Structure formats: structure tokens, C-alpha cells
């Protein structure tokens, strides 16, 4: 299963970015999709998840109120809208799925990952 992230960029503190997760072969609308991030020298950190079916969304406390996860089924994509970005949001961002409808905060429970997209927040 191939997942593809896009949208990473260099942005100033307080700015906004929208990341996209797409798949050429998997219908993303069926499954839970998680977003994770990993900064250099740090462990991979769970950011957000949207469940399959009932579309329940979950956020890490560090991004709650600033990030929004959403699906666009017409584009077979899941987006992570990020606003009021902070330098500590700098990381490679990854989307992932375990081909179930259930969200998990644990990276080990996800079997399929994208290659990541870099977000750098700096003035």
C-alpha cells in the first residue's frame, strides 16, 4: 500500500500550511488515517487521526486548536490543516494507516506509511 504526503514547506512562525495524504491504490475514505511527525533526534510523535466510517477526529494536546484533520473523498485524500505554526512544529510529517477504521496513537500499530514531507517553521 502506497501513501504519499505533500505540502511541506518552510513557513514563518504564526503561518499556516496544509499537508495532504493521498494514495494511488487505496481508497482512503474507508480507513482510519493517522498523522505523525518526527523531528531530528526525537522519537516519532502522534499528531492526529481521523477514523473510518464515523469520521471521529483526535488531536495531540500540542496541536489541539491549531491543526485540523479532514477528508476529501472526491480527491481520495486526507488533509492536515496547520495554523499558528510554531518552531517546535518543525519535523518530517508522515501519514499512515493500519487498514482498519480505528484510530490509534501508537505508531507500532500502523503498517503502511508514506515517505514523509518536511515542515520547517522558522523566521
Image (cartoon, rainbow, N blue to C red):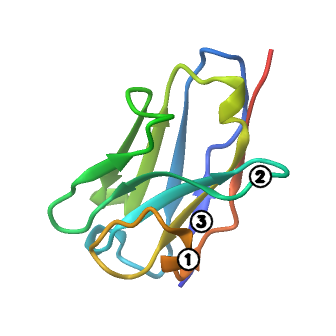
45 lies above or below 59: below
Q: Which residue is mark 3?
A: 4
SS class, disc 3: strand
Q: Which residue is mark 2?
A: 42
Q: Which residue is mark 1?
A: 108
**Neighbourhood count class around disc 1 (C-alpha, 10 Å): few under 14, some 14–19, many 20 upward:** few
**Neighbourhood count class around disc 3 (C-alpha, 10 Å): few under 14, some 14–19, many 20 upward:** some
Q: Are marks 1 and 3 in contact (CB under 8 Å)?
A: no
26 lies above or below 63: below
Residues under labels 3 and 2: Cα distance?
22 Å
In the rendered structure, which disc, 1 or 2, sits on the residue that comes first in sequence?
2
Q: Are marks 1 and 2 in contact (CB under 8 Å)?
A: no
Question: In the rendering, at what x and y percent does residue 93 appear?
Answer: 64, 52
95 lies above or below 112: above
SS class, disc 2: loop
In the rendered structure, which disc, 1 or 3, sits on the residue that comes first in sequence?
3
Residue sitting at x 51%, y 56%: 35
Image label count: 3
Residues under labels 1 and 2: Cα distance?
16 Å
Residue sitting at x 29%, y 68%: 29
Q: Which mark is residue 87?
A: none
Q: Nearer the viewer, mark 1 or mark 3?
A: 1
Q: Dividing the picture into quarters, in which one does residue 89 lie?
A: top right
Q: Nearer the viewer, mark 3 or mark 2?
A: 2
Question: In the rendering, at what x and y percent does residue 52 appear?
Answer: 25, 68
Residue sitting at x 49%, y 64%: 22
In the rendered structure, which disc, 3 or 2, sits on the residue that comes first in sequence?
3
108 or 51, nearer to the observer = 108
Residue sitting at x 43%, y 80%: 98
Q: Quadrant of the C terminus?
A: top right
Amino acid at each position: 500500500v502506497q501513501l504519499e504526503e505533500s505540502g511541506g514547506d518552510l513557513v514563518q512562525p504564526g503561518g499556516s500550511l496544509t499537508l495532504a495524504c493521498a494514495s494511488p491504490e487505496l481508497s482512503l475514505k474507508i480507513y482510519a488515517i493517522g498523522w505523525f511527525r518526527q523531528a531530528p533526534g526525537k522519537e516519532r510523535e502522534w499528531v492526529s487521526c481521523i477514523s473510518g466510517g464515523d469520521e471521529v477526529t483526535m488531536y495531540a494536546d500540542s496541536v489541539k486548536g491549531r491543526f485540523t484533520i479532514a477528508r476529501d473523498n472526491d480527491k481520495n485524500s486526507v488533509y492536515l490543516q496547520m495554523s499558528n505554526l510554531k518552531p517546535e512544529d518543525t519535523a518530517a510529517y508522515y501519514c499512515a494507516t493500519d487498514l482498519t477504521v480505528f484510530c490509534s496513537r501508537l505508531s507500532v500499530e500502523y503498517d503502511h506509511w508514506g515517505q514523509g514531507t518536511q515542515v520547517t517553521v522558522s523566521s
